[in-house]
């Protein structure tokens, strides 16, 4: 027990491997400058996404005359733009310094967010959100690429968890912000509360973009950050098996040989399918089903605007706790990220069954059924843990791959997931299906079973590949040692002959 406590204390206190002098100070610096910018960026990214649903239940639906599944169609337009931007965004990091690329994308999406405050129809929002999706596609997979460039296998899970939690915090706080704006600014200067929400959301993004322009450190081999010494820059490069080239490549990256190597790798298919499945296990939360349930809930009196915005914040709150717990635990257990897949599978099956049971109960509008539905949606928020752990798992599995290979696979994961989500949400979780989403509940059960099966297969592949890599390293080391011994013996014989 005492040994376990010492290991836990060492894990949480350590900022880097103490075997290398200066590493703790280096990791503390990059924690501050990388994580602060990336977390603030992702917080604002998710604040913007969640605020569409918050605005919808706070008067936008009635003001703009939404009908049917137009809210889902807007989300699909955003997702299509998001999918289109995935791979180009991550490839851009191979040519453009992240210090310039990330903030530029932030300025673009901040401007588009403010433009949303001026729209007068759902179709106008569809156009704005499409381009917004392209701009915002840079944040999630781009940050995971950066984290994999700076942090070791022991460090990355915890940092990925903190990054993911920041996005969930944006979702959670968005409800409170909208509630506060609605009560204090509704009809101020003739603007509805939901319009003020988009204006304020865009304005607060700009200072974070400026911070990135000035202080983001790029990648270990390309950084010119003034707060890193020359020794720290060399250490940052030496800590990881592969690093970025110090200058932009002179030859094209997208060659047929490179594409063949990516498309025939197990990492491409294994992790893309993993995230396609796992991404859909987040559907209860990512489609704001609790908000839509409350908006059309079979109860009297109806929920107030404040309740519609505040009650669903419990979902991302659970997600934050679950994300940090699993990201930290899998680091501590030596990178056993696959455990999260089984936890999420169980969660998806049980929460779906709870909601189906409530819908089929004798009194679906009663307090008991309502309590079951709220409990299920809150628990379902725990599946957000897969974001941090599965992308950390992918980074771990590609440690020995070149950076551009890793960048393309990470982008491909999110591309695949969002390409499916573009139609999945309409088919299974359309706003017109509220409040029960029966079709979506059965889809969630099937998806959760598929996730458990795929996780088992992928964990086998990664373990087998790692075992083979270690065997090759051992053979190489043994061969080098034999060659060294033979060389020493030969040198001794020559010395003897000279004497």
Image (tube, grey):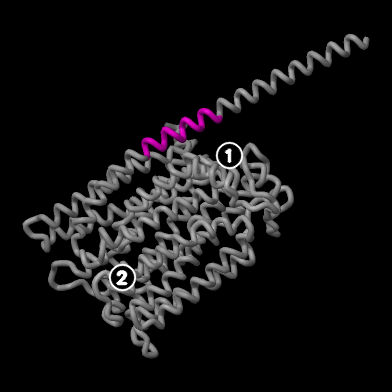
Q: Position of residue 121 (x, y in %)?
A: 34, 81
Q: Residue furthest front?
A: 256
Magenta segment main secondary structure: helix
Q: Give the camera-side residue of 84 and 26.
A: 84
- In the rendered image, residue 301 lying in the magenta stretch gets the answer no
| Mark 2 lies on residue | 71
Q: Quadrant of residue 274?
A: top left
Left or right, 81 with respect to 430, comes to right
Q: Left or right: 291 with respect to 102?
A: left
Q: Position of residue 48 (x, y in %)?
A: 42, 69
Relative height, residue 174 to residue 225 (above, below): below
The residue drawn where x is 41% and y is 61% is 169
What is the number of the mark on residue 400?
A: 1
Query: What x and y, as percent, mark residue 81?
Result: 44, 65
As helix, strand or loop, the secondary structure at mark 1 comes to loop
Position of residue 482 in the picture relative to residue 180 (left or right): right
Specify start and end residues of the magenta stretch as a single range. 455-469
Nearer-the-camera pick, 204 or 423: 423
483 or 186: nearer the viewer: 483
Q: Residue furthest bottom?
A: 189
Residue at 58 percent of width and 27 percent of height: 472
């Amino acid at each position: 027990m005492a040994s376990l406590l010492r290991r836990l204390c060492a894990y949480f206190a350590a900022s880097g491997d103490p075997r290398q002098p200066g590493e703790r100070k280096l990791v503390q610096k990059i924690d501050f400058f990388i994580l602060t910018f990336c977390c603030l960026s992702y917080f604002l990214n998710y604040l913007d996404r969640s605020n569409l649903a918050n605005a919808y239940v706070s008067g936008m639906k009635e003001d703009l005359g939404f009908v049917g599944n137009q809210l889902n169609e807007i989300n699909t337009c955003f997702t299509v733009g998001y999918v289109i931007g995935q791979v180009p965004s991550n490839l851009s990091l191979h040519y453009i310094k992240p210090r310039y690329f990330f903030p530029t994308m932030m300025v673009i999406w901040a401007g588009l967010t403010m433009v949303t405050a001026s729209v007068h129809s759902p179709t106008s929002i569809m156009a704005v959100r499409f381009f917004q999706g392209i701009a915002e596609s840079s944040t999630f997979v781009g940050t995971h690429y950066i984290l994999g460039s700076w942090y070791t296998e022991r460090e990355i899970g915890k940092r990925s968890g903190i990054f993911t939690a920041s996005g969930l915090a944006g979702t959670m706080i968005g409800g409170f912000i909208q509630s506060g704006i609605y009560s204090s600014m509704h009809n101020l200067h003739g603007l509805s509360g939901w319009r003020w929400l988009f204006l304020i959301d865009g304005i607060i993004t700009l200072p974070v973009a400026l911070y990135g322009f000035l202080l983001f450190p790029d990648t270990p081999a390309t950084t010119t950050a003034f707060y890193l010494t020359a020794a720290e820059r060399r250490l940052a490069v030496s800590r990881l098996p592969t690093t970025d080239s110090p200058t932009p490549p002179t030859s094209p990256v997208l060659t047929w040989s490179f594409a063949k190597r990516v498309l025939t790798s197990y990492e491409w298919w294994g992790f893309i399918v993993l995230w396609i499945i796992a991404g859909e296990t987040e559907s209860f939360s990512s489609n704001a089903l609790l908000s839509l349930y409350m908006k059309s809930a079979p109860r009297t009196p109806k929920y107030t605007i404040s309740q519609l915005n505040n009650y669903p914040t419990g979902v991302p709150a659970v997600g934050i706790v679950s994300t940090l717990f699993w990201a930290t635990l899998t680091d501590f257990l030596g990178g056993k990220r696959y455990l999260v897949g089984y936890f999420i599978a169980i969660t998806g099956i049980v929460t779906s069954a709870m909601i189906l049971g409530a819908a089929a109960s004798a009194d679906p509008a009663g307090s008991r059924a309502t309590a079951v539905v709220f409990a299920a949606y809150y628990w379902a928020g725990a599946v957000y843990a897969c974001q941090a752990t599965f992308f950390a798992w992918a980074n771990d599995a590609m440690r020995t791959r070149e950076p551009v290979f890793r960048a393309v696979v990470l982008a491909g994961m999110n591309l695949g997931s969002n390409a499916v989500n573009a139609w999945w949400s309409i088919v299974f979780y359309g706003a017109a299906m509220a409040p029960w989403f029966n079709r979506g509940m059965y889809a969630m059960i099937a998806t959760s079973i598929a996730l458990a099966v795929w996780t088992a297969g992928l964990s086998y592949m990664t373990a087998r590949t790692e075992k083979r890599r270690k065997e090759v390293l051992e053979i190489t080391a043994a061969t080098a040692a034999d060659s060294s011994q033979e060389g020493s013996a030969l040198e001794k014989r020559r010395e003897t002959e000279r004497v």
